[in-house]
Image: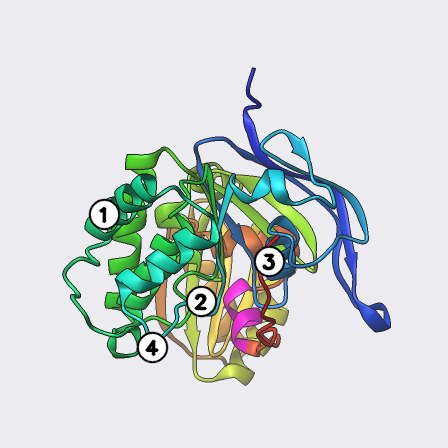
Amino acid sequence: MASECALSFDRVTKVYRKGKMALSELSFEVPRGTTTALLGPNGAGKTTAIKILVGLTEPTSGRVEIGGMPFSADRRPFQRLVGYVGQFTSVEVTATAQQNLELQAALFRLPPAVRRQRIEYLSHLFELDRLGDKRAMSLSGGQKRRLDIAMALVHDPQILIMDEPTVSLDVEGEREVWQHLVATRREQELTLLFSTHYLDQADRYAENILFINHGRLVTAGSPTALKELVEGDTITLSCADSNAAARGYELIEPLPFIEAVSVQGANLIAVAKDGPRVIARLVGQLQEAGLTVEQVQVSRPSLNDVYTLLTGDDFEAVDAAGRPIPKPQFGRPF
């Protein structure tokens, strides 16, 4: 009987040279046939986890399983199971889309008939057959990314693993890529795991979310279930400037009816049950201290609110504060 779990980490730790710990006893499971987001701010350990899964780096300790099989030094059993799309394109820019797909098929030694069938199928699915003889260097970012993904699927894997698949794309390019990914997922019944630091992307496309930070699992669940962890409404109070917001934080944080509070620039973000009823009390508290509230907004909980509740930090602020994005490390998976 096939395992219902496509991928799993069991207390996986990764320590780089000079003692830098990227993952600390990280454990999670990815159910077969689902779309799962590995979500966290830059520097959370997402790329390290992906590189372990595709054999580009070794865990220091812990157990990794793919397709129900323990990961071992012999990568051959896993090469056919997994397709991989890294942060940085693997497209040969001097070649056409057709030539890139042919090269990838040759690397996997696909029989000629299978090769033709897969390339024709993927070219149609990702609309690469419309590109003609254009070299990849002349393609848009979205077109190159679609070609990257098609190349990762040439050998018909059961699992597709992607590291920040739309990080360098504009809004239209991102929409275009995800439109094709959703269609591919439906057509091929893939298990899809993608890392991202975009909250809206995880919320929109993932059935399950693995929220990680500092190399540890913060929480896991569906977007809806995670947002239900926040019992209340999100209240955004716009102050005059960041200094005023910081002063407001000191006033609001001790209030018994406030579940969580954080600062985003000149905004105070508070979570409270029955938000509309407590707005007047919050505004009054700030005004008594001589602080001006320029705008108030109430909304239902978001994934950012979940992160704030569980870590005490603001996800978007941590991202903007600039944990360094790892430099590209090239290598062939497995």
Q: CA distance from mark 1 to mark 3?
A: 33 Å
Amino acid identity at mark 1: Glu
The residue at which mark 3 appears reads as 46
Mark 3 / mark 4, whichever is N-terminal: 3
User: Helix or strand or loop: what does disc 3 sit on?
Assistant: helix
The residue at which mark 4 appears reads as 94
Mark 1 Cα-neighbour bin, 10 Å: few <14, some 14–19, many ≥20: some
Residue 333, quarter of picture? bottom right
Mark in front: 2 vs 4: 4
Mark 1 / mark 4, whichever is N-terminal: 4
x and y percent of residue 64 in the render? 70, 41
Amino acid identity at mark 2: Ser
x and y percent of residue 269 in the render? 49, 64
Residue 90, numbered label: 2
Mark in front: 1 vs 2: 1
Amino acid identity at mark 3: Lys
Q: Report the side of 257 relative to 215 (left or right).
A: left
Which quadrant would the N terminus be assigned to in this image? Answer: top right
Instruction: Name the magenta segment's main secondary structure.
Output: helix
Mark 4 Cα-neighbour bin, 10 Å: few <14, some 14–19, many ≥20: few
Residue 120, numbered label: 1
User: Helix or strand or loop: what does disc 2 sit on?
Assistant: loop
Is residue 88 in the magenta section?
A: no
Q: Which residues are magenta?
A: 315-320
Mark 2 / mark 3, whichever is N-terminal: 3
